[in-house]
Image (spheres, grey):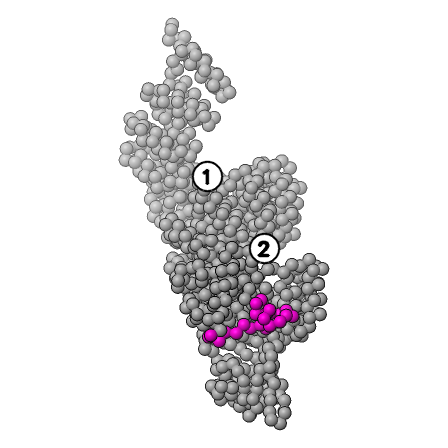
Amino acid sequence: MMNMEVRAMGNRYLAQLRHPSLAPAVHAHIITSGFTPFPLLLNRLIDHYCKSSNLPYACNLFDKIPKPDIVATTTLLSAYSAAGNLTLAHRLFSATPFSIRDTVSYNAMITAFSHNHDGHAALRLFLQMKRHAFSPDPFTFSTVLAALSLVADHETHCHQFHCEVLKWGVLAVPSVLNALMSSYVSCASSPLVDSPAAMASARKLFDQAPPSLRDELSWTTIIAGYVRNSDLAAARELLDGMTHPIAVAWNAMISGYVHHGLNEAAFDLFRRMHRLGIQQDEYTHTSVISAASNAGLFNVGRQVHAYVLRTVVHPSRHFVVSVNNVLITFYTRFGKLVEARRVFDRMPVKDIVSWNAILSGYVNARRIDDANSVFREMPERSLLTWTVMISGLAQSGFGEEGLKLFNQLKLEGVEPCDYAYAGAVASCATLGSLDNGQQIHSQIIQLGHDSSLSVGNALITMYSRCGLVEAADTVFLTMPYVDSVSWNAMIAALAQHGHGVQAIQLYEKMLKEDILPDRITFLTILSACSHAGLVKEGRHYFDTMQAHYGITPEEDHYARLIDLLCRAGMFLEAKNVTESMLFEPGAPIWEALLAGCRIHGNMELGIQAAHRLLKLVPQQDGTYITLSNMYATLGKWDEVARVRQLMRERGVKKEPGCSWVEVENMVHVFLVDDAVHPEVHAVYKYLEQLVHEMRKLGYVPDTKYVLHDMESEQKEYALSTHSEKLAVVYGIMKLPLGATIRVFKNLRICGDCHNAFKFISKVVEREIIVRDRKRFHHFRNGECSCGNYCVYHCAIELRAEHSSSLDLNLNLIVLVRPPLPPHPRLFTFRGDTKGSARSGDGSARPDQVGPAGQNVQLVHQGSLNYNGLQVQPQHMVMPSMQSQE
């Protein structure tokens, strides 16, 4: 009687457990009543707690069972697997005696390994299962074949399991058939496998299967397989042969078209889906919006957005999040940040992808204040969030903030990835902070991130911008893999440091390595030619862009070519290039022309270019300064005053010249005429001593670079207060004896400072590296790496004097060309001149001077003896580089 009552009570509890909401109350009643539940009741309670994600209760109940049966064990094991706790699942399975294990328990553990992407462990357990004589069932093969798809890298592996499936006679089970096809498809994606052969095996399985076995998953698997392996024709053939359209297969086809850049085909298929009434979901819409984005079709993307709003009435949470995330990216890609933010703000639910998408949009648009605001508001941050923000700060010129954020990332216990380290290195490059850059490089090596492509590319740029082009070259040569970005970075490094010939040699080597140049490559190589005065080579590379590589030159390419021609004084050719463009010249073109006019003293064209720039970019302070300097050179002080008044009226403020040098991990900044730095008086005093020694070697302050109406002594003092001089002197005072001085300047270095640093490098016997806004200058033993091409490339007016009082007005252009000094000066006579020319000190080559424009090579700058006439330079018409301080 007692047993019958216990059984009746147990049955009542079981009946009540059919209602999940009553399970906690039933469990509580069992405990308070003192009733001892039998195994079926305990298993039912454990199952309830596992399904309700209340694992602690399930574990507690399981641990109180003296000898849990295989049902309870398998239930808890599956719960551990679903929670992602593979360690506890495996521990529980290993503790289960072989005597009570069954096929279901093995299936649960194999599934756990497979779901947690440990395919090898799943395959090993399958082999163990067979060794211990446990018979696999269809579910076993479905799960183990899913695991095989994760790791298969040889077609033989798939064949072996194919044989097992045939041996056990389970190929007729749809889930097994689909899993086996999926394993062949995944294997085909391995680089070690003959993809067509593996796909042929999958297709054979599909074709030989009875139509009744081919379900939606079968069609989707084979079509998606062809898409993944880039056989879009075969995928489309299958899609068109379907008797009943399957939306997932159509989505896979559209996604394949988008992935391979066939955007128009994706649009056509999307329209066909609409006509046939095939259900479109979030995967359809995200692919089509991405196609519009990739194709640059803003209006098409907006139309799809409107179509979604009009046709989707009750979207699911997943639909809302995924489609809106893609829309945010779409709008930011076209610079429509207002629309992107509107989509973001209207989202009822957001995930981390939503926040990262709007953050990336602001970062890419250089709207750092807005990006910082979003970053602070984010409810959670992923490693991608930190990486985007660090890299964005660096690219926008906020290197110090980027480094601070990188340090904050580590302080919060987040392990930086290689992309985060690349952002930190880029921050050091922006600051020119070599010490910090080298420290981070050491951490990168310790953590094994030095093999990362992104890190290597960032290191090349960092060392280049810190003045160590040799270290950049070492990084480039030791990288395990390089791409076009790596080559571009190294070519740009050589160009910035004045090694134009080496840059060209590296470019030619790149072509021999079968790396195709892109638009950035041509920008860097044109810059290299411009910095080194390699006109012929630059024109050749510009011509090959379209002819050999099908790259249409854009405005920035034309600007580099015009800069190259103008630096060489070829204004007529520069004008012809400008007129040949298929678009109206923009600011970059006029900036290049203005720079050339400044160098050569072409006042008329220079003033015209400056006025064009003032209309196009009225807030750019450099144009006003250059125009003012040109008027000052001509002595037109009224015009100088008018330009400066125009600046005041338009609210344009001149960027103050500043230079900085890093000493013992601290950056010391100096302004022009600095009186703020705590040691500036000691700097001025030491500078006086250096100038005294420099004068003994022939240094004379070049007051023509002071374009102000003042006395000569005042001009010499003004030159001595330039920020780059103060920073160099401070570096000499503070850095160890023999250490290289590295100074960075926000404006272009002035000609007198350039000349002074040559003398200083000789006096103190140290290398001085100065990076201005254009390039690097390496001063060693009284010479500069630029070969003075950038500085003494100027126009001089000569007056020929003769006893008969015959005056000859000759225009002389002085070009300083590589290789490194001493350089021959190229003198070009303008006018109808014939005869021979010789330098005043008699050391020139006695070359012939022919018709106008003929060249004569002279070794030293000085007076000329032309047919017995002594020719002396009277005054400089236009210096090459004027002080912007």
Q: Residues within 10 Å of mark 2 (few under 14, many from 20)?
A: some
Residue 63 point in image, percent of width and height: 36, 22
Q: Can you tell which quarter of the image residue 73 is in?
A: top left
* Residue 210 painted magenta: no
Q: Nearer the viewer, mark 1 or mark 2?
A: 2
Magenta residues? Answer: 696-718
Residue 314 point in image, percent of width and height: 62, 35
Nearest the viewer among 654 and 720 is 720
Q: Can you tell which quarter of the image residue 85 is in?
A: top left
Amino acid on which the number 2 mark rests in the picture: Ala
Residue 213 is labelled as 1
Q: In this view, does 151 lie to the left or right of 750?
A: left
Tell me what residue is drawn at x 54 percent, y 62 percent.
723
Q: Is residue 125 left or right of residue 678?
A: left
Element at label 2: helix
Residue 553 makes an appearance in the image? no
Residue 838 point in image, percent of width and height: 51, 88
In the image, residue 814 sits, relative to residue 28, either above or below, namely below
Estimate the spatial distance between the alpha carbons at disc 1 and disc 2, rounded to whole Å: 40 Å
Tell me what residue is drawn at x 55 percent, y 56 percent.
676
Amino acid on which the number 1 mark rests in the picture: Leu
Tell me what residue is drawn at x 52 percent, y 81 percent.
861
Nearest the viewer among 658 and 121 is 658
First in sequence: mark 1 or mark 2?
1
Nearest the viewer among 49 and 403 is 403
The residue beneath circle 2 is 295
In the image, residue 151 sits, relative to residue 491, either above or below, namely above
